[in-house]
Amino acid sequence: MKITEIFVENLNTISNKIRQANLQGFCGDCPEAAIFINKNIFQNRGKIVGAFNRAFLEYGQDPIGHVAVLYNGNYWDADAKPKHLDEIESWGMLDPTDLDYKEKADEYGFDWNDDTASEVIITSFNSDQALLDFFHRN
């Protein structure tokens, strides 16, 4: 079996396991998806990493962004496709013209502009519980 065939087979296995678990992995479900992926696919050998908009996180403790599993140099989430860090970071880079974000920024007391919309903070979690606590899911 060629390396590319093994890789495709592994991707299919990951995709099937995620589908069988009925995980969305997006729209707020990425923490649970990352925990599932790390436990059931990578046997807890991955590192759960989040990329969040810095301003919302610092001013409102509001984690707007994405969570994925770093394993063997790639980031994995519920779509079962290997990603680079910039793809994970992009979830924390928000639209500076979005009025909903502007309104929320006003509520939290910070200026909503190109800089605050695009600045991302990367963090890792040393346990599943730390991730769930971060998202206030106990």
Image (cartoon, rainbow, N blue to C red):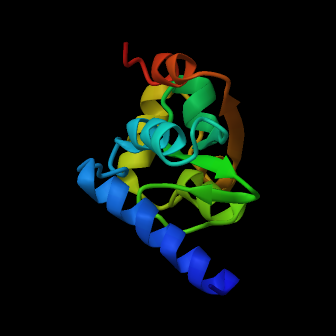
Q: Residue at x 55, y 35 (%)?
A: 56
Residue at the outermost front position: 1
For the image shown, how many numbered marks are present on the structure?
A: 0
Picture coordinates of residue 55, whole percent (x, y) = 62, 36
In the image, is residue 105 above or below residue 94? above
Between 54 and 51, the residue placed more toward the observer is 51
- Residue at 35% over, 41% down: 28
Q: Quadrant of the C terminus?
A: top left
Residue that protrudes farthest toward the right in the picture: 73
Q: Is residue 79 visible?
A: no
Can you say whether 40 is above or below 63 in the image?
below
Image-based side of 49 in relation to 33, left or right: right
Say which quarter of the image contains residue 48: top right
In the rendered image, residue 111, in percent from the top left (x then y), is placed at: 59, 40
* In the displayed structure image, the side of residue 121 where residue 87 appears, left or right: left
Q: Residue at x 29, y 52 (%)?
A: 24
Q: Position of residue 31 (x, y in %)?
A: 45, 36
Name the image quarter holding the N terminus.
Answer: bottom right
Q: Nearer the viewer, residue 116 or 20?
A: 20
Q: Tell me what residue is drawn at x 48 percent, y 16 percent.
A: 133
In the image, residue 43 above or below residue 11: above
